[in-house]
Image (cartoon, coloured by chain):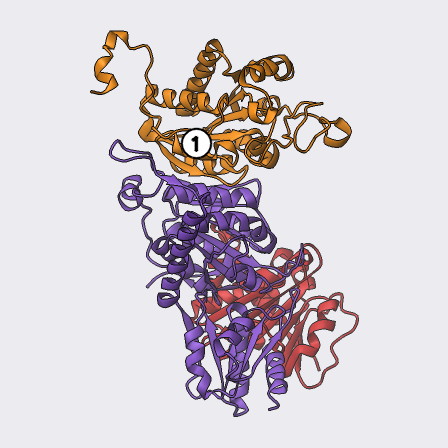
Chain colours: A orange, B purple, C red
Amino acid sequence: MDINDIIKPENLVYKKSPVLTDTVMHYCPGCSHGVVHKLVAEVIEEMGIQDKTIGISPVGCAVFAYKYINIDWQQAAHGRAPALATATKRLYPDKYVFAYQGDGDLASIGTAEIIHACNRGENIVVIFINNAIYGMTGGQMAPTTLLGMKTATTPYGRKVELNGYPLKITELLAQLEGTCYVTRQSVQNPASVRKAKRAIRKAFENSGQKKGTSFVEIVAACNSNWKMPPVKANKWMEENMFPFYPLGDIKDR
Amino acid sequence: MAEKLLKKGNEAIALAAIRYGADGYFGYPITPQSEVMETLMEEMPWETTGMVVLQAESETSSINMLYGGACCGKKVMTSSSSPGISLMCEGLSYMAGAELPCLVVNVIRGGPGLGTIQPAQGDYFQAVKGGGHGDYKIIVLAPASVQEMYDFVGLGFDLAFKYRIPTMILSDGAIGQMMEKVELRDPVKRLTDEEIVEKYGDWATVGKPATRNGNIISSLSLAASEMEAINLRLQEKYKTIEENEIRFEKLMCDDADYMLVAFGSSARICESTVEIAREKGIRLGLLRPITLFPFPTPVIQKMTPQLKGIMSVELNSGQMVEDVRLAVNGAVPVEFYGRMGGSIFSPEEVFKAFAEKFKL
Amino acid sequence: MKEELIIAGFGGQGVLSMGRILAYSGIMQDKEVTWMPSYGPEMRGGTANVTVIISDKRISSPILQWCDTAIVLNQQSMDKFEPMVKKGGLLLYDPNGIIRHPTRKDIKVCSIEAADLSNRMEMSKAFNMVVLGAYLKVKPILEKENVIKGLKKSLPERYHNLIPMNEQAIELGMRHVKEVI
């Protein structure tokens, strides 16, 4: 007997989206990637666009996103996801195309690609996970690392003289005429998860209506590389990340 | 009779792309090949065949747009010149690893560095020995006329899709800028999205139907054993290509005592050198490799017994000559003559070098 | 028949387009042709030259060490290309602006006052066609009707109204070319 046979429909309060695969995620406990993957899968399911969606995965922790969301995927070279997404959307204008990128991928090595894709107003969705650190390579400084923050390559804390300032790439992209929707969200509690999902849904709808580039930043915790337990990491994020990276819509038209 | 036009090599590439049903061109301006994108923009194929043409922000982006387009099962291409191709090598390695078809045109200029905009063949190694990282090969076609610039677009796409491999047209500033007569071939229609699903739906990212799991295109495999298996499969594919796709042209080789080996614009110049030698009673022939990978090794090996010597003639410091020597394996003397940095030799100059090297 | 020629002058004199019209005319007469320009920064105001080969047979090298004909339209080109003409070949030039005239005795030297003529006839834009006419008079390798066809093929349709003027310019060149002794 399967568990689904026991649960009566009226008692069902939560169900994993069928757009998610059964593969066990490689993300660390407490990581935000899994939640965001779930939200993307749910939006794809609810909009009924599983057969029309093409995802581009980055280099970084989310490189294996293709294992978890059951759609067609392209795995891009480091930073180049917006270039792949551009060509894919232009060659298949009626498909939903999204790039899923981290802070090193999008805001460091891939700055040219993201700025020009947004500036051309490509009708794509970009999901940007900003946890202010390089995850997969083991906790080095990211362009979004806060001043004073300790990482493997800023062992004494990020200093302006040595490393410059944390990059507010999202505010920068909001300046570009090609973006139609630029927002910053988080997923550390149920309320923020619900808001983030609404933002992702809106971004996908914009893509369908060909309104321009929709850009959703998720300020996220990387408790492993921040070297904190998950609960403490979320608190640290609220206290330190949110003041510098304030949540909410930056642009909506 | 098909229409005959006077066109530059670069313009021929653009016209061929439209008429051969290319789905997308993504490029970045660089001399001496900018006429490719300029011609495409002037022709506006999106109004006729539906072909997408986009000026990217860099060559890095162009090649990654090709990566995305190729993932979609679409016929996509770019063109550039040497420094731009260097930027594309990362993407080429990824595409070779992910086994994706695409067409890249390199209209070579003199290097290294920013170099010169004059013609050269200094990118031979980069094209046939990899260029990017890892053990991979791409098919390399070397046109020697404007007509071949046109025809190799179709051939290049066909080979790219037959083997799911990036294919390069390795040309140079001389062939790109030169005008010659071009005969346009019958147009080939672009595949519809439905036809692409039917032909390539088992691997391409065309949108996942309910009947299958998602197609994933990736060059990543963290387990060494898996990665080795992928490499073995790639090497097997390269072997099949070597067995089946060698293309070359021989000129006056049947009775030859000596043979020049040259590709592209060098081969055109060497054709005249052969005429000069024959007038003087020297039995000189010319082998022109058309595919640089796969290299016509067996053709050279078959010729070797009748020859007293071979000279490789290239617009570089001596790159293809290494492959000629590997083919000959010491059986006859192999000499080299070349110019670099955008300087071109004349047929007479090549003959003089040939006569001196073999003391004729 | 095989004619290998170099046309050289300042950028903006119509050197490249004259070569192109000649090459297209060759195609109209069922010849094989190549047109190989010097390209790059020198195109923008400096010297420009183009090698045109017209032949009955497949053309081997598009790069020349010697030429049958040199058409020379400025001093730098005179200095550079006079020595490249094959013995018995032709050097055609416009004396306008030339201070060191050709000295070789083993080639045929002709002149055409193309700049002066085209200015006087108020067709300075067809300067290069005056030169082309002069060349075709001395070396009638192509029939005039094919040259007109070549001209039509070379010019975008919006400029086809200029064809009669270009034709006149060709005839003007044919009438005024002189052999220099």
Name the foreground residue: A67 vs B102: A67
Horizontal relation, residue B8 to residue B233: left or right: right
The picture places residue A165, in percent across and down from the top left corner, at 70, 26
Vertical side of A133 occupied by B321: above or below: below
Q: Nearer the viewer, residue B92 or B226?
A: B226
Q: Quadrant of the C terminus of chain C?
A: bottom right
Give the image quarter of residue B3: bottom left
**Outermost residue, top direction?**
A10
Above or below, C53 against A246 in this view is below
The residue marked by circle 1 belongs to what chain? A
Q: How many marks?
A: 1
Q: Position of residue B307 (x, y in %)?
A: 48, 87
Hey, what amino acid is under mark 1? Ala
Q: Residue at x 27, y 35 (%)?
A: B212
**Residue holding disc 1:** A65
**Residue closest to the eye, B44 or B214:** B214
Q: Is residue A222 visible?
A: no
Secondary structure of residue under mark 1: helix
Quick check: can you spot residue B79? Answer: yes
**Quick check: B104 left or right of C117?**
left
Graded by Cα atoms within 10 Å as few (under 14), some (14 to 19) or many (20 or more), the crowding at tag 1 reads: many
User: Which quadrant of the view contains residue C122?
Assistant: bottom right
Q: Position of residue B119 (x, y in %)?
A: 60, 63
Residue pictured at 40% horizontal, 38% vertical: A91
Residue at the far right: name it.
C99
Q: Is residue A4 above or below residue C106?
A: above
Q: Provide residue C114's location: percent of width, then percent of height.
A: 66, 65
